[in-house]
Amino acid sequence: MTTSARSSASRRPATSRPATTGVPAWLLVIAAVGALFVLLPVAAMVLQVDWAQFPALISSPSSVDALLLSLRTSLTATAACLVLGIPMAMVLARVPFRGRGLVRAIVLLPLVLPPVVGGLALLALYGRRGLLDGALPVAFSTPAVVIAQTFVALPFLVLSLEGALRTAGDRYEAVAATLGAGPSTVLFRVTLPLVVPAIVSGAVLSFARALGEFGATLTFAGSLQGVTRTLPLEIYLQRETDPDAAVALSLVLIAVAIAVVAVAHGAGEPLRRRTA
Amino acid sequence: MTVSGRLTAAAASLAVLLLAVTGCSASGSPSGTATPTSAATGGATGTITVFAAASLTSTFTELGKQFEKANPGSSVTFSFAGSSDLVSQLSAGAPADVFASADEATMQKAVAAGVTAGDPVDVATNVLAIAVPTGNPAHIESFADLAKPGVATVVCAPQVPCGAATAKVEASTGTTLTPVSQESSVTDVLGKVISGEADAGIVYATDVRGAGDKVDSVPFPEAKDVVNTYPIVAVGQGANAAGGKAFIAFVTGPTGQKVLRAAGFGAP
């Protein structure tokens, strides 16, 4: 996000030289404390890993199933977030209508809802005794996991993309329209290419959130190996009998999350440079 | 730079939020509360910290109130969670005077970890029960019915006590279940039945009793073959060893047993 902020700044006319103003020393200290606050617990967990047993712990059939299921469902949920979230962000950023603030608040609701409550809400709609009267039979199935993940991850994409669309402004779109481009052409040829970095970072955030999703899945989808038991649920269960396995799997989850962020940043970098 | 700066800030706060949200698991909070001890005459005094299995929540909360009434100047604080979680916390040095487990295997872990003081005593027993949504929509009549195709049965995972007990019943009845979900706690099983998502769930008799008219229960004779015992023990890590012993005596005594029996627990 920092790099995209920098590139959007450099896109502007060079009225001001990007002077490297230093930050106060005390700020550096607080920032370091903040970084350690996040890093130390994770580092402490890494120190707990029983490395001799590590390969065996993470390659058990239940662990492998959980990892594959998590990757599959999180990627599907991310795709769903892109399909639903890009139009949502476009509408919120470009279409003025009454009650837009309210709609935005509703879209962001899954961010503040405890995940378990999100799961209960999904049950209230899709459940057998829910509002839809079980018309969509997703109970205890993999699609239920994807629904839960999409529900909690969607706001991350909408939020980051809407901000980027507002920052980018609509000057280029207006120019394209005066040159005779239709709305869909403007969308695909002008608007979206301008915000690709934001789409990438929004998708990464959504993926990360989907990967870590626990409460809504537990409440809404259940927990069965290979079907609904994602990595976080497997970790939670392993904890009961084998804390070492739980720690080892947590490390796998962290590694996957870091790898995805790194890959996405790598993929986003040339795009950013091109748009800059 | 201001707008994009704000964006960066938004992204940063989002990342923090992400950590906060994903880090929120359902584990119980470690108890470390210290309420001021008041000196009173007679009986146990001071704060007694009790770690108890989640399935004892309502009965022990009730018993805590009665104990405080019978022992003026005492106060009982509880930490309710899965038995395994509690043993992990005790092993990590959590201060507690009493530990009550939902099964003997988990109690053995606590004993092996060296956190107990004295021998565990059995305080109650519990048997499994079939919980079905009100009206029993799938017409479950027996344990064997749970294995019928098309019946969505939810059970505890074999790693947790209720799941281990379920596996024993399966073995003793020769019935192999193909559950649609293996939950990590009995509460989650009950939740799936109450919401009607599952046709049936295997929980404890006390869970069915506690759920009132939100679920129906299907009795099955094989349940008596697998009896789950709840042991209780003094823990040496608290500040109130005498109070802990008094609470254990209270729970295993007539008043405690009456309350436990009323909730559906069996005699030890």
Image (cartoon, rainbow, N blue to C red):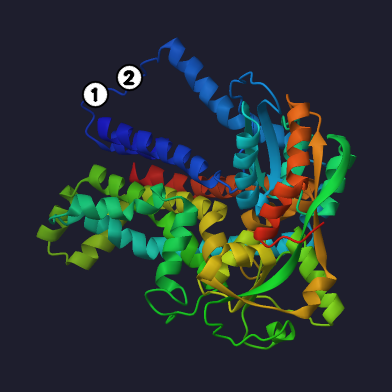
**Residue that appears at 61% across and 60% down:** B187
Chain hosting mark 2: A
**Residue that appears at 81% across and 72% down:** B224
Q: Tell me the distance, in whole angstroms, between the alpha carbons under discs 2 and 1.
A: 8 Å
**Residue that appears at 52% across and 65% down:** A220
Residue B8: x and y in percent read 37, 35
Chain hosting mark 1: A
- Height in image: A29 above or below A80? above
- Is residue A71 or residue B111 the one in the foreground? B111
- Classify mark 1: residues with Cα within 10 Å, few (<14), some (14-19) or many (20+): few
**Residue that appears at 70% across and 25% down:** B42
**Residue at image mark 1:** A16
Quadrant for residue B50, please give it.
top right
Residue A138: x and y in percent read 50, 76
**Residue at image mark 2:** A19
Say left or right for A18 vs A33. left
- Is residue A169 or residue A132 the one in the foreground? A132
Image label count: 2
- Is residue B192 or residue A136 the one in the foreground? B192
Say left or right for B224 vs A69. right
Give, as a three-letter code, the residue at label 2: Ala
Q: Quadrant of the N terminus of chain B?
A: top left
Residue B234: x and y in percent read 81, 36
Element carrying mark 1: loop
Task: Evaluate whether residue A248 shows in this view.
Answer: no
- Height in image: A237 above or below A18? below
Residue A141: x and y in percent read 57, 74
| Residue furthest left in the image | A178
Element carrying mark 2: loop
Say left or right for B58 vs A21. right
